[in-house]
Image (cartoon, helix red, strand yellow):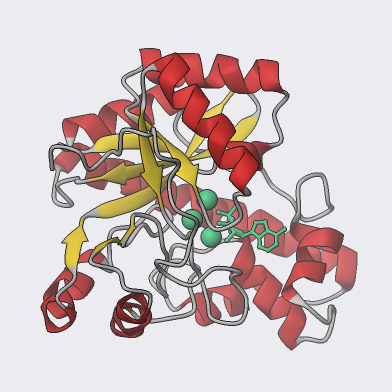
Amino acid sequence: MIDLHCHSNFSDGGHSPAELLVLAAEGGVKTLALTDHDTVSGVEEIRGLAGNHAIEIINGIELSAKWKKYDLHILGLGIDIFHRGLQELIRQHRESRISRAEIMGERLAAATGLQHTFERAGEIAGHDSIGRPHFAAVLLEAGKVTTLQEAFVRYLGKHRVAYVPGMWQPLEEIISVITAAGGVAVLAHPFKYRLTRMKLHELIRIFRESGGYGLEVVSGYTTPGEALELAGLCRKFDLYASTGSDFHMAGVSRVAPGRQLALPDDCVPVWQGW
Ligand code: AMP
Ligand code: MN
Ligand code: MN
Ligand code: MN
């Protein structure tokens, strides 16, 4: 089993790299990419521990990207995590996350009366790669919501009061940095952006023209019908197919590491030739 998309507590996942490896081994995973949001800080740790489970590690990251008014997620697989351009991009995104989180804190204070959510989100995260899930945890802890999901529905989701779009680098720049770092760029969960079919096709065409390599045909929330449609888009746009659980946390994520659907038969996988 191969899982090329999952998160640890170096971004918004609930588990350390060590715990993640145990769950991946239980899911029969033989090849794993840790793809934390805008950071590679967990990669060396997971690489150092993976041998104990006979799991091969592919270096990875899930980079936020801007395309038109949309916030997209691009997986970088097989990257050199020490590449200078990549390190610089990560630094820019870390700063963007902090500025954005400060504004989110102000909006949440105005909307809920709860003070210091920015500081508390940072404490909960334990690192600088602060994201909306950390604010959701703050709201839950303070009793402002009863579930993490409710925090997104009421405050943090798109168009809600505390939603602040990210100041990410443009899609084309993200793809070019991933490629310069020796990796391949994969458009993560293409149906999650709620684009019309026309917009989605436009995005995939531009992604391909900008050096994009693959589509994530199967993710944790993909239905069999969606997987078939995405496999068709791989053929249409001459792209490779990727698969990953997008696992974040036991009890929260629907699919555990390695437990996502199988790729449709006629896909050419991104790992062909690795
Ligand atoms: P951010 O990168 O700060 O915009 O946070 C995005 C992350 O929030 C995603 O990677 C998911 O882990 C999580 N997320 C986004 N939307 C929801 C939602 N509706 N419910 C739960 N988690 C969500
Ligand atoms: Mn996430
Ligand atoms: Mn994502
Ligand atoms: Mn993800």
List x then y, in percent, for residue 213: 32, 28
List x then y, in percent, for residue 217: 47, 40
Q: Is residue 99 above or below residue 31?
A: above
Number of marks drawn: 0
**Left or right: 214, with 45 as reference point:** right
**Left or right: 226, with 27 as reference point:** right
List x then y, in percent, for residue 111: 88, 64
In the image, farthest residue toward the front: 265
**Left or right: 153, with 225 as reference point:** right
Q: Tell me the residue at 82%/69% (across/down).
A: 150
Q: Is residue 102 above or below residue 253?
A: above
Image quadrant in which you'd find residue 22: bottom left
Q: Tell me the residue at 19%/46% (across/down).
A: 78
Residue 160 is at least partly visible in this image:
yes
Most foreground residue, 266 or 191 = 266
**Left or right: 240, with 165 as reference point:** left
Q: Is residue 196 above or below residue 221?
A: above
Image quadrant in which you'd find residue 193: top right
Residue 116 is at least partly visible in this image:
no
Image quadrant in which you'd find residue 126: bottom left
List x then y, in percent, for residue 136: 69, 71
Q: Tell me the residue at 30%/69% (across/down).
A: 29
Q: Tell me the residue at 36%/57% (across/down).
A: 35
Q: Quadrant of the C terminus?
A: top left
Q: Quadrant of the N terminus?
A: bottom left
